[in-house]
Amino acid sequence: MLYLIGLGLSHETDITVRGLETVRKCERVYLEAYTSILMAADKESLEKFYGKEVILADRELVESGADQILKDADKVDVAFLVVGDVFGATTHTDLVIRANELNIPFESIHNASVMNAVGACGLQLYQFGQTVSLVFFTETWKPDSFYTKIMENRKIGLHTLLLLDIKVKEQSIENMARGRLIYEPPRYMDISTAAQQLLEIEEIRGEKAYTPDTPCVAVSRLGSPSQKFKAASLKELAEYDAGEPLHSLVMLGRQVHELELEYLYQFVDDKEKFKAFVEADQEFFKPPPYVPPEENFSD
Amino acid sequence: MLYLIGLGLSHETDITVRGLETVRKCERVYLEAYTSILMAADKESLEKFYGKEVILADRELVESGADQILKDADKVDVAFLVVGDVFGATTHTDLVIRANELNIPFESIHNASVMNAVGACGLQLYQFGQTVSLVFFTETWKPDSFYTKIMENRKIGLHTLLLLDIKVKEQSIENMARGRLIYEPPRYMDISTAAQQLLEIEEIRGEKAYTPDTPCVAVSRLGSPSQKFKAASLKELAEYDAGEPLHSLVMLGRQVHELELEYLYQFVDDKEKFKAFVEADQEFFKPPPYVPPEENFSD
C-alpha cells in the first residue's frame, strides 16, 4: 500500500495520530523535500520521533524516480510524507496516477495546509478566489501571470492568497550547464520582496489590479509557535521585515465583512489608517449601482 | 489558555499528535457539534480516546454562551474542538474576538478540512474560486445566492466547491413558535438533492451559469474509510445515490488541465462521454479570441 500522509505546517507533532501510526508500520518512509519545509522540524527530528529512517525525496527522485518510490508497494507499506496536505502539488497527483497504473492501492491521510490554515488571519476562507504563486524575479525573467488572476479575483470582490517562491536544492545556470550537481543555498521569498515585485508589475502593467494602498495581510510562519500576522497597505509591506520564513501574503478583496475587519484590527499599527485603506480600496471594481427596472405604464 | 483544535474529517485519530496532547492537559473540553460531524467517531468514542469528558457545544452555547466556555480560561486550559479546521465558521472567529476582549490568550492547532482535502479528487486547489453553500430549499424559500457566485467562478474558468447543508439540532417552526426545545432528526443534504436544486435554479434564472451537462464531481465521505468520488454531468448526479453522508459537490470550470482530467477518469462510468461533457462545457465563458494589435503603417 502507498500512503500519502500530510505533515501539517510546523512541528513533528503536527502529524495526525493516524498518520503517525501509519508511518510507524511502513517499510520505507519518503519525505518530499522540495515544495515546502516543516518550520520546526527536520529529517533528524522526524526520524527520532518516528523511530524510523526517513529518505529525502528531491525533485529528481519524485519526478523521474516514481518507480523507485513505488517499488514493491503492492507487497509492503510505503509512506510518502508531504508538508502541509497531500494534494498541494501536481507532482503528488502524478505519483498516484503511476501507482494506479501499477495496481498499487493507495490511501491519503490529510492534514492542514496554508490553503485552509490561512483562515487564522480572520479572513473567511469562502471569500477567497483562486490562489496565485509568486516566483523570484531575475533581471530578465519577471513572470506576471499572477497579475491577471489577482485582477479576476478582485473584480468579483474576493481575497487572494499569494504563495511565495521556495527554492530548495536548485542549481545555478552555470552548474546546470556543466552538469555539476552542486546546489545553491535554499531561498525563501519574504513578504517585502513579494510586495516589491507586486508593485513593480503594477507599475509596468498599470491596469490597477491593485494599488500601493491596497490592504494586505502578511502571514509569517503560519502554524508555528512564532506565527505572526501584519495587516497593512502593500506599500507598507514592501518595507516590512517579517522575520524568519515561511511567509505568505493575502491581498484583500472588496467584499470584506465587518467581522473580518474587526479581527484584522488586532494586526494593524493604526486602525484608522488601515480602515481608510480598506474604504479607498473598496472603490475599485465596484459593481454598477442598482437601477430598478422601468415600470411599464403603457397598459 | 483557550485552544482551538481542528479534528480533521473522520476518525478520532485524525486529530494531530499535538492536538491530542493538548486536549489531554485541558481542564474542560468542548466539541462544537452543529456545523459539521466527525464521520467515524462520536462523543463517546472521543471521550474514550481522550480519557476526558467532552461537552457538546450546540449553537445556543457557542453563540450566546461564549463567556461560559471561556470561564477561567485565563487560569486553566480550555479546549474547543472543531470538526475539520479551526476557522471554518464565523462563530469560531467570534469566540476568539471575545477571548481577546477578556485578555485570554489563545492558540490554534490546525487540521485538514474539506477546503483543502477536496484536492483528493484530483482537481488542483489553486484552480478553485470562491466556495459556496447550498441550503435545503423549502416550498417558499429557495435562496439562490450561490448562482451568481458559481457564474463568477465559471466566467474566469475556475472550479467551485459547493458545501451542502447540515441541519443538526434544528427546531420545527411549530416547536420554535411554541418555545418547545424539541429537535428534528439531523439532516444532511445529499448529492442528488444538491444537483436537483442547482438544476431548479438554472431553470428559473436561465442565465446559463451552468447546464444539465456541466461536468461535476460528487465527493462522498471525504477523508473517511469509505470515501468515494464520482465524476459525471450535473443531470446524472441528480439521479446518483452517493450513500451515507457527508457529501460535497465540485462543479468544474473551463480551465481543466490534462492532468486533472486524467485523474478524474478513475471516477467516471464512461470516459468518452465525460470527456464530451467537459469539451462542450468549455465552450461556455470562453474568452474572446486573441486579436493581434494592428500594426501602424502610417510612418
Image (cartoon, coloured by chain):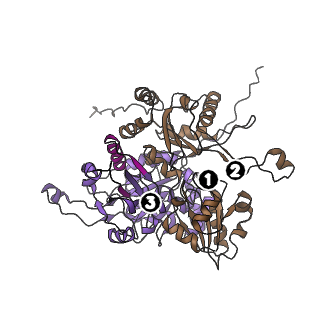
Chain colours: A brown, B purple
User: What numbered label is drawn on residue A37?
Assistant: 1
Say if B207 sits above or below B292 in the image: below
Mark nearest the camera among 3 and 1 is 3
Secondary structure, mark 1, is loop
Q: Are marks 2 and 1 in contact (CB under 8 Å)?
A: yes
Q: Kindly identify which chain the residue marked by label 2 belongs to.
A: A
Q: Amino acid at mark 3?
A: Gly
Say if B142 sits above or below A270 in the image: below
Look at mark 3 in the image and give the residue it sits on: B19
**Looking at the rendering, which quadrant does residue B59 occupy?**
bottom left
Q: Say few, some or many: other residues with alpha carbon within 10 Å of mark 3 (under 14 / 14 to 19 / 20 or more).
A: many
Secondary structure, mark 2, is loop
The furthest residue to the right: A178
Q: Amino acid at mark 2?
A: Val
Query: In terms of sequence position, does the residue under pointer 2 or pointer 1 come before the other?
Result: 1
Report how far apart the C-alphas of labels 3 and 1 lie in the structure: 20 Å
Give the magenta range: B78-107
The furthest residue to the left: B178
Q: Is residue B87 magenta?
A: yes
Look at mark 2 in the image and give the residue it sits on: A168
The furthest residue to the front: B75
Q: Kindly identify which chain the residue marked by label 1 belongs to.
A: A
Percent position (x, y) of residue B47?
34, 69
The furthest residue to the top: B299
Q: Is residue A253 magenta?
A: no
Q: Is residue A108 visible?
A: yes
Front residue of A60/A282: it is: A60
